Amino acid sequence: MAYCVHCGVKLGDGKKRCPLCQTPVYDPAEPRREAAAPYPVRMPEQELKKSKRFLLMLSALMLLMPALLCFIIDFLISGAVTWSGYASGALVMLFTSVAVPLQANKHQVYFAIASSFVCLNGYLMLVEHLSASGPWFFPIALPALTLAAVLIFFITKLYRDGWLNKLTILAAFLAAIPAECLFIEWLCNLSWGKGPTFIWSPFVLAPCMFLSLALFFINGNRAVREEVRRRVHF
């Protein structure tokens, strides 16, 4: 004898619904079939790829319009491509440095470092060519950017591998800044035929190293580190 679970009406044999309230009658012993979805389910990976393509198309259109406008204005005024090369090159560099990491599903940080390094070098080569100011890219800019990319790469890897925290990664970057400045001044002196004298880079070295050592010292003292985190939410 079966009864409706909703209203308690007595049910006849073989009834699929309650005659009073139309509540479905289910037999626990009968295997149930899952209802087929009326539409295909979109996977998260498909949504992610769709959003990436949309962002790339939108950013390309937003950067293409000012680039073309710069070329048109430059050509109408001077009859040649002069200053518009700087603006358009910067826009292309910006788009490429953002587009390449978006295409990578893993290690986007490393792709961002590599693409920014390549794009910035290409832009500086364009600036050297357009300005005709002498050979300064290969003797100065390329080595300086290479050292900066290597430092950023290793500091980022140490942070992602758990060797550095938010406090010590800031200390590491503060220590890398004067190293980069010393290297740039040394490259300039070497390129311009000057002696191994450092004029402006020591002024960057002193405060950055002081702050870097102070942050490492704070990180080494647990009580001071926790107090700093509570006060500055770091």
Image (tube, rainbow, N blue to C red):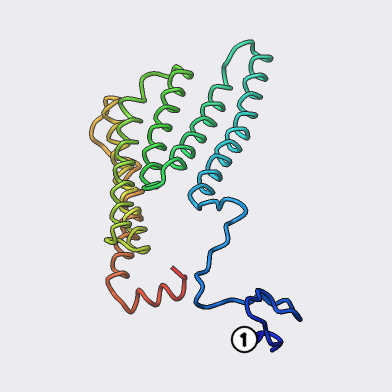
* Residue closest to the eye, 197 or 32: 32
| Location of residue 78 by image quarter | top right
| Location of residue 117 by image quarter | top left
Q: Determine whether the residue tagged by mark 1 lies in a helix, strand or loop.
A: strand
Quarter occupied by the N terminus:
bottom right
| Location of residue 225 by image quarter | bottom left
Residue 175 percent location from the top left of the image: 31, 53
Q: Residue at x 74, y 79 (%)?
A: 19
Label 1: few (<14), some (14–19) or many (≥20) C-alpha neighbours in 10 Å: few
* Whether residue 221 is situated above or below residue 186 in the rendered picture: below
Residue 120 percent location from the top left of the image: 42, 33
84 relative to 31 in the view: left or right? right
Residue that label 1 marks: 2
Q: Residue at x 32, y 56 (%)?
A: 160
Residue 124 percent location from the top left of the image: 43, 27
* Whether residue 166 is situated above or below residue 62 in the rendered picture: below
* Residue closest to the eye, 6 or 224: 6
